[in-house]
Amino acid sequence: MNIYIGNLSYDATEEKLRQAFESYGEVTSVNMIMDRDTGRPRGFAFIEMANQGEATAAIAGLNDQELDGRTLKVNEARQREDRGGGRNRSRY
């Protein structure tokens, strides 16, 4: 299961997130989203856990909990919507 973690402190690290979630089960990946221009964290991340039950327990256990002085928002990640993004649209 892919999990969204929001409201992260800019001091948060992938290792701190991994440690927090590993107390609930096996973490297969941690993806902290970084700003392209500054290289600093953007305040959210995604964690993938191998087991659905462990992931559900992690969401319940860590949502609204504090990490590095910030209250985390943790929930199941939604599929990314296709935004179109193409510039070849006609002007009719």
Image (cartoon, grey):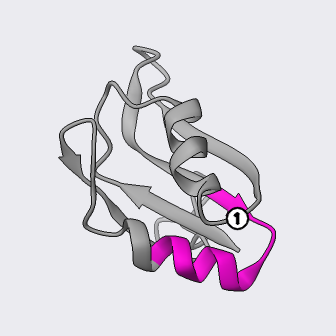
> Residue 82: image x %, image y %?
61, 71
Horizontally, residue 34 falls left or right of residue 11, namely: right
Q: Name the residue nearer the viewer: 26 or 81.
A: 26
Task: State the residue lying farthest toward the top.
Answer: 38
Q: Please name the residue shown 63% across and 75% down the image.
A: 55
Per the image, the residue denoted by label 1 is: 25
Quarter where residue 30 is shown:
top right
> Residue 81: image x %, image y %?
56, 73
Horizontally, residue 89 falls left or right of residue 53, namely: left
Quarter where residue 73 is shown:
bottom left
Q: Please name the residue shown 42% across and 72% down the image.
A: 61
Q: Is residue 31 above or below residue 76?
A: above
Number of numbered labels in the structure image:
1
- Helix, strand, or loop for circle 1? loop
The magenta stretch spans residue 27: no
Q: Is residue 45 above or below residue 10?
A: below
Query: Which span is picked out in magenta?
Result: 47-59
Task: State the residue lying farthest toward the front.
Answer: 23
Dominant secondary structure (helix, strand or loop) of the stretch shown in magenta: helix
Q: Please name the residue shown 52% across and 38% down the image.
A: 33
Q: Please name the residue shown 59% across and 57% down the image.
A: 23
Can residue 77 be seen?
A: no
Horizontally, residue 44 falls left or right of residue 57, namely: left
> Residue 50: image x %, image y %?
81, 69
Q: Name the residue nearer the viewer: 64 or 36.
A: 64
Amino acid under label 1? Gly
Q: Quadrant of the N terminus?
A: bottom right
Can residue 48 be seen?
A: yes
- Dot 1, how many residues are within 10 Å of its Cα: few (below 14), some (14-19), or many (20+)? some
> Residue 63: image x %, image y %?
34, 69
Q: Name the residue nearer the viewer: 1 or 19.
A: 19
